């Protein structure tokens, strides 16, 4: 068991997960609590790698499970299915999240902060302000990058006025041009050439379950949906492998065009009707104009059809 309180986001970490874990560690340390350590539950993606390289810092240590009684702080998630191995027996002392609350139970009271914002780092930015703690360039860049990532440069329907205000102020501290830096960062995350189809399907995937229906919604960002679809056959094979391996009822891969704010879905599994009920599938695919958010658009769509 680690002597420090471990801070981590969800499996298959995205930029908000990694940046928020690092920022939460810094926030606690600046508040006088040095017994904390940011860690991660998977490999960093290329977008996050771009951010860390830009700042000049290393990614947090990788962990796969925690021991019984380990004190932890969960950021950018609360569902145990998306968390570290052993989370059921860990001592959760705090959660900071911007998602729905589901599949979550603790034996003891805890600090829980949930806000319907577009990004966890927007919540953390508010905590810096509330505690009157100075934000330096590194911290500002981390939080600004997370907001850009989760809101797709403020174009996602998850974006709130709080995200817009926070990003404007953080970009000023960081000394970055929001559009120039943001587009470069997002484009870095669309370089998919080095990934196998199995890696693409697991790069940014989240598992959900409702009424006994097990579902995975995976998402990859691109500037050309057609380029990704050149790998459709092998992507489907990888998705079917995930269905077989994890006993899934449906596996959905959202290929999201970050420039035009659209998504092409590939849908496989016995419960493909969770999409078919609302949108006709042709060869296991459907194009959804204006759909970019898994949290606010895809998940509600799926759950409404279960």
Image (cartoon, grey):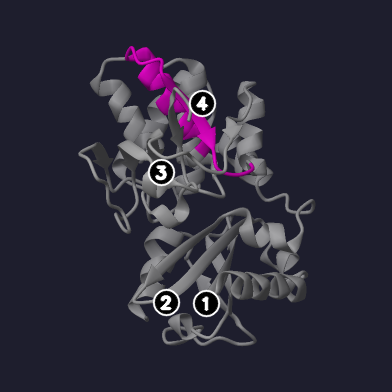
Q: On screen, 222 above or below 51?
A: below
Q: Earlier in the sequence, mark 3 or mark 4?
A: 3
SS label for mark 4:
helix
Q: Is residue 165 visible?
A: no
Q: Earlier in the sequence, mark 3 or mark 2?
A: 3
- Alpha-carbon span between mark 1 and mark 4: 37 Å
Name the mark on residue 27: none
Q: Single out the residue that lies furthest toward the left.
A: 109
* Residue 254 drawn at (x, y percent): 57, 66
Q: Is residue 36 left or right of residue 239?
A: left
The residue identified by callout 1 is 250
- Alpha-carbon span between mark 3 and mark 1: 24 Å
Q: Quadrant of residue 251?
A: bottom right
Q: Earlier in the sequence, mark 2 or mark 4?
A: 4
SS label for mark 2:
strand
Front in this rendered view, residue 253 or 223:
253
Residue at coordinates 26% horizontally, 39% vertically from top-left? Answer: 113
The residue identified by callout 2 is 213
Say whether residue 24 is magenta.
yes
- Alpha-carbon span between mark 2 and mark 4: 39 Å
The residue identified by callout 3 is 76
Q: Is residue 9 left or right of residue 160?
A: right
**Do the residues bearing badges 3 and 4 touch, measured as CB atoms within 8 Å?**
no
Q: Earlier in the sequence, mark 2 or mark 1?
A: 2
Q: Where are the magenta residues, as a range?
A: 18-43
Residue at coordinates 37% horizontally, 81% vertically from top-left? Answer: 305
Say whether residue 89 is magenta.
no
* Residue 181 drawn at (x, y percent): 59, 33
The residue identified by callout 4 is 141
Q: Earlier in the sequence, mark 3 or mark 1?
A: 3
Q: Nearer the viewer, mark 2 or mark 4?
A: 2
């Amino acid at each position: 068991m680690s002597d420090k309180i471990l801070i981590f986001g969800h499996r298959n970490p995205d930029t908000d997960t990694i940046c928020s874990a690092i920022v939460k560690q810094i926030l606690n340390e600046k508040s006088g609590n040095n017994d904390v350590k940011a860690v991660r539950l998977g490999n960093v993606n290329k977008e996050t790698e771009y951010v860390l390289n830009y700042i000049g810092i290393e990614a947090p240590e990788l962990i796969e499970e925690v021991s019984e009684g380990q004190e932890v702080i969960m950021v950018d998630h609360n569902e145990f299915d998306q968390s570290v191995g052993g989370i059921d027996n860990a001592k959760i002392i705090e959660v900071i999240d911007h998602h729905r609350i589901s599949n979550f139970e603790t034996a003891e009271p805890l600090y829980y902060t949930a806000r319907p914002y577009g990004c966890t780092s927007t919540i953390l930015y508010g905590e810096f302000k509330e505690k009157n703690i100075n934000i330096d360039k590194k911290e500002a860049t981390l939080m600004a990058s997370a907001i850009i990532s989760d809101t797709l440069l403020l174009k996602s329907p998850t974006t709130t006025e709080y995200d817009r205000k926070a990003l404007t102020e953080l970009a000023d501290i960081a000394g970055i041009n929001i559009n120039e830096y943001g587009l470069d960062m997002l484009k870095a995350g669309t370089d998919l050439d080095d990934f196998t189809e199995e890696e693409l399907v697991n790069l940014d995937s989240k598992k959900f379950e409702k009424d006994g229906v097990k579902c995975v919604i995976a998402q990859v960002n691109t500037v050309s949906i057609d380029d990704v679809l050149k790998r459709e056959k092998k992507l489907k094979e990888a998705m079917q492998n995930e269905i077989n391996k994890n006993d899934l009822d449906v596996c959905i891969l959202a290929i999201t065009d970050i420039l035009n704010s659209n998504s092409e879905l590939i849908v496989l599994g016995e419960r493909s009707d969770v999409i078919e009920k609302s949108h006709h599938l042709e060869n296991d695919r459907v194009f959804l104009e204006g759909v970019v958010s898994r949290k606010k658009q895809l998940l509600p769509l799926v759950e409404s059809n279960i």
